[in-house]
Amino acid sequence: MVTARLLRATFMNCQAVAMIALSPYSLSAVGPSEIVGAWVMSVDSRLLSKSVDLEIDHRTDAWKVTLRSDAGTVTTDRVNLENDVLRIQYGVKPLDVRVELKVLGKTMSGSLVTGESNTLRRQSITARRAPVTDAAAAMKTEAESNKTVGEAREFLGAWELSLRPVNSESAGAIRLGMVVTESDGELILGHSDFEMRKSQKRVDQVQSTHDGLRWILDGGIFGMLSVDLVSEGDTLRVEVTGEDQEPFLVGTAIRKPKASDVGVDWQQLIQKPRAELVGILGDDARVAQVNGDRLIIQQREVVSRMIKGDPLLVLFEWFRLPQRSGWISVESNYAWSVIGSTIQSWDIRNSQTPLALGSCEFPGNPPSLLRRSGQLLFAANWNGHADTQQMHVIDVSDPSSPRLLTSHNTPRGSNNYDLAIAESTLYLANAGGLRIMDLTNPKSLVTRSNFEGRGRWVRGVDVVGSTAYIATSMHGDASWLQIIDVSDATAPVQTGIYRSTGGAQDVSVSGDLAVLADRAAGIVVLDVSEPQNVRRVGYFRTKGHANEVDIFGKLAFVAVDGDAGARALHVIRYTE
């Protein structure tokens, strides 16, 4: 009997141990209650430059996880916790995102997984518990900010700086406008360019030194310069130091009555940017096209897709062409690329090995721009003769046999910069203005009118309904956004205008907002709900010249050319 009882007890203990081991949340495993709450996740990504907020919730065997960043927000219940590994999924195949995190107490680490087989990509991820907001620290920071403003009272106002190169008495004086002001308890400094021309720039990080103030000036070819201001009664002593820590310019500053006297717009200076950089994508990246909730990006021979509102800004590689293409357009199972002066069509149903189908040559040089609308491709190029450009129309309804329908001459000497297509009308932005052409018969383009822009060149165009938005510019960085009523294609009428300062290159419109690629001034966000009263509501200073812009959801994808000629795609979030 004793032996039987011992055997029965031993069996029951083993059964209990087995049940504990089989339990998904056993004593040795992490349970949901231990990971719920706020986390901060960092991704090893070339594109996403900031961390991602991760909020985990679990109630009655139901999960809800929210990932949030400046790029977007997504919430999903496709969550699993097993063997101390948290798995989170969102998106739809083939654009499916998988996050795998090993729980290690107050930290987690793992991988961001996308794609399959040859397109499988893994990026390292780490996560840590979100810090608790320290109210005392926030108050201390605000007090220090107020202290800086208080110490700078004598510098507030408008100033004209007169500078001379060190050890050069014969050189003429270089003038620079400067305004020092405060906004919401913060010290802000704005300055014009040299000789008080071109776009003004705002400096948010102004240092308070023992003798006065210090700020950083972009000296163009001279690099970043450090400017020191020291009060000397009614004037300021100014010293500009180069990157080698040697004095570069010296001079004085005298007070002026108002900001406009020194080439600075005070209202724009105190305006909050309401836009911030989310990430940067290099490798000559460009937006190939925006297709609903999908963004198609080309990086030389690689074509990738991105989903709208993705907080991780994941690039899903779609296919690779066997050689680098200047331009590319994609629709469903087919793609068209430009190689030299040839349009090549591709079958991309097998994304690993795109199949070349047909091709079509057109006269002249490689195109300066390419757009597709339905079954038609439009390519603009020089035709090989001096000062003459053409618009070519290619029928791609049969991908195996694209064919040239017509080549339309555009005015001599008028470079073609951009084009937009709305229904059966083509809007061509060029150096001669905005040409509006009827596409009813694609074999014979008919010019309905030519609207001469305020500036010499119409650089960019976007069309919404019966309204065309054009970016125009001329020498001296004078430039404008013009709003044109094109309901009557034969008689377009301007209904609104906004003068920019950097050299308007391109424009993209979404709802009541227009984002202007303003070259040296970065991007400018404009409220165009009332065309007769266009208002600047935000901006972002890019490091380099902003030349092209595309809106995708709440983000602006801006093609920026650096000093060395390298092109990158800056992703900027703006606030409505």
Image (cartoon, helix red, strand yellow):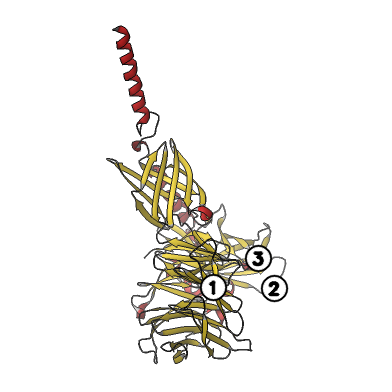
At 72% from the left edge and 66% from the top edge, which residue is drawn?
A: 167
Residue, x 41% and y 36% (percent of image)? 83
Q: Earlier in the sequence, mark 1 or mark 3?
A: 3
Mark 2 in CB contact with mark 1 (< 8 angstroms): no
Q: Which amino acid does the dot numbered 2 rest on? A: Ala
**CA neighbours of label 2 inside 10 A, class few (<14), some (14 to 19), many (20+):** few
Residue in view at x 59 percent, y 89 percent = 388
Which part of the image, by quadrant, shows the C terminus? bottom left
Q: Are marks 2 and 3 in contact (CB under 8 Å)?
A: no
Q: Amino acid at mark 3?
A: Phe
x and y percentages locating residue 423 in the rendered image: 38, 82
Quadrant in which the N terminus is drawn: top left
Marks 2/3: CA distance? 17 Å
The residue carrying mark 1 is 357
Report, in whole angstroms, how far the alpha carbon at label 1 lies from the one at label 3: 51 Å
Percent x, y of residue 530: 33, 77
Say which element carries label 2.
Answer: loop
Q: Which residue is tagged 3?
A: 222
Report the amino acid beneath label 1.
Leu
Most foreground residue, 252 or 371:
371
Q: Which residue is mark 2?
A: 171
Crowding around mark 3 (Cα neighbors within 10 Å: few <14, some 14 to 19, many 20+) is few
- In the rendered image, the residue lying farthest to the top is 2
